[in-house]
Structures are given as C-alpha cells and as structure tokens.
Amino acid sequence: QVQLVESGGGLVQPGGSLRLSCAASISINAMGWSRQAPGKQRESVASFTSDGNTNYADAVKGRFTISRDNAKNMVYLQMNSLKPEDTAVYYCHAYVYGLGISWGQGTQVTVSS
C-alpha cells in the first residue's frame, strides 16, 4: 500500500497563499490533490496524469499550481489568491497500477478574514 502524508494546511486570509506538500512512500507518476468542503462531495483540484500532463479544476485555474520533486517523491500544491470557497480538507491522492487509488489523511485549509 502507498503511504501519503500531507502538510502545509492552515488558516489564511482571502487573497493569501498557502503551499501544500505531499510525501509519497514510493515514486508515483499519477498523483494529485482533491478537496472536500463540508456538505459537498470530494472533487479533484489538480493532478499529474501518468504521462506527465497536468489537469486543473476550472475553479482553480490560474490560481493553483501543482508541481513535483521526483527525487524526493514529493508533490506540491501552490495556492494563490485564495478565496473563502477554497476552504476544505485537501487530500493528496495517487494511482498505482495494481494497487488502485491511495489517499492521504487530509489537511485543513481555511480561508477566512
């Protein structure tokens, strides 16, 4: 099983920035970030596909950037121009052929003045 550990969440004012980090126990190509706000379904925010392309949800395009450090098995999510509607628990996820999808424990991001 793949282990994923997120960090970097917290409280930030509207318009502020946060950087989330995810450490994976193995090297994985298909990784990304999802979020779940109270009372809402979990939604994909940004991800790397297995062939190295990136996908972003329309709601975060131009504000969030996903990046990675393959040498450290790390994936990051830089979040700028944060809005109150970005408040959610953010989860790192990874897909490995034969193992399926793994999820981290989640990190809370709260955008509020």
Image (cartoon, rainbow, N blue to C red):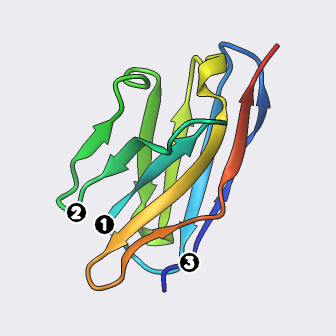
Q: For label 2, count other residues whose C-alpha is less than 10 Å away and answer few (under 14), some (14-19) or many (20+).
A: few
Q: Position of residue 22 (x, y in %)?
A: 57, 59
Q: Position of residue 44 (x, y in %)?
A: 41, 43
SS at mark 2 in the image = loop
| Residue that label 2 marks | 50
| Residue that label 1 marks | 29
| Residue lying at 34% horizontally and 35% vertically, measured from the top left | 56
**Name of the residue lying farthest toward the left:** 51
Q: Are marks 2 and 1 in contact (CB under 8 Å)?
A: yes
Mark 2 vs 3, N-terminal side: 3
Q: CA distance from mark 3 to mark 1?
A: 14 Å
Q: For label 3, count other residues whose C-alpha is less than 10 Å away and answer few (under 14), some (14-19) or many (20+).
A: some
Q: Amino acid at mark 2?
A: Ser
Q: Based on the displayed image, in which of its 4 quarters is residue 101 positioned?
A: bottom left
Q: Is residue 46 left or right of residue 98?
A: right
Residue 7 lies, with reference to residue 80, above or below; the image says: below
Q: Amino acid at mark 3?
A: Gln
Tag on residue 3?
Answer: 3
Nearer to me, 53 or 88: 88
Q: Position of residue 32 (x, y in %)?
A: 42, 53
Q: Based on the displayed image, in which of its 4 quarters is residue 3 positioned?
A: bottom right
Mark 2 vs 1, N-terminal side: 1
Q: Position of residue 85 (x, y in %)?
A: 60, 21
Residue 113 lies, with reference to residue 52, above or below; the image says: above
SS at mark 1 in the image = loop
Q: Amino acid at mark 1?
A: Asn
Front of the two marks 3 and 1: 3
Q: Is residue 29 something that shows in the picture?
A: yes
